[in-house]
Amino acid sequence: MTVTVAAFYRFVRIDDPSALRSWLRERMAVRAMTGTILVAPEGINGTVSAPPAEMVAFLAELRADPRFAGLATKEARADAHPFQRLKVKLKREIISMRAPEADPTARVGTYVAPKDWNTLIQDPDVVLVDTRNVYEVEVGTFQGAVDPGIRTFGEFPGYVANKLDPGRHRRVAMFCTGGIRCEKASAYMLAHGFSEVYHLEGGILRYLAEVPQAESLWQGQCFVFDERGGVDGADLDPHAGCSGTSVPTTR
């Protein structure tokens, strides 16, 4: 059975997260979907799978809500559901940083399309930062990227405070798997005095999908937190998340 796997997020004010959670659970259950969606006052973040026609119908229903009109998704095909069950969880944040000033609904950095990314990151005046966790970076990253050495995204503010200076590092470019971490990371840095902050629009997944391999500056695979393991634009990597820790391991 072929299924569609869709990843998406949206930073938007959710006044009643519990009501949205109930609606999502009901709509996903009737469409035989699996995967996880996080719901918080700041928005939603999910990766889900469904038979292709059911995914089209679900996303149409979701986008009919004015809060999610124009919701962008990153989609792929799989031979079977990569998730074991359906989960819709209430959270304080859809991506946890524990820094109230990191508010993407107030301001974010400059989006850079995948086609323009190579030019930006090859500029010697640009500091290129991988905002993902250290075990993700070990599987693959962009040439010349700085690894902050963080184990959780909540450690990112400490890295910025200790290693980056808005007076010296005037141009900073960041990237992550699908774009969500960079939304918060760029908002945090702008709030702390960095004036030129860029981030890869759609994340690594969109870059791998749109930039020809012959032109790609990506090295290795991109780790994803599901049974697919890692992706490099077409093939699957033999890494997958340990069921207890999500740290990449071989099969």
Image (spheres, grey):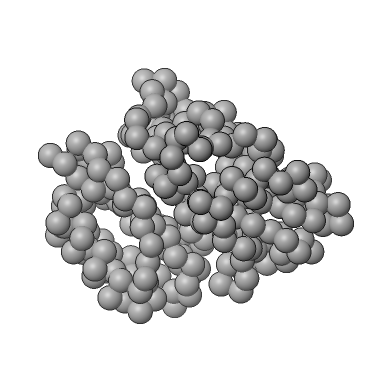
Residue that appears at 45% across and 44% down: 211
Residue extending farthest to the right is 167
Residue 198, x across and y down, in percent = 64, 57
Residue that appears at 19% across and 45% down: 3
- In the rendered image, is residue 95 in sight? no
Picture quadrant where residue 108 is located = bottom right
72 lies above or below 165:
below
Q: Nearer the viewer, residue 234 or 30?
A: 234
Residue that appears at 29% across and 69% down: 62
Can you say which quadrant of the picture contains the N terminus? top left
Picture quadrant where residue 225 is located = top left
Can you say which quadrant of the picture contains the C terminus? top left
244 lies above or below 114:
above
Is 134 left or right of 12, judged from the image as shown?
right
- In the rendered image, is residue 185 in sight? yes
Q: Nearer the viewer, residue 171 or 86?
A: 171
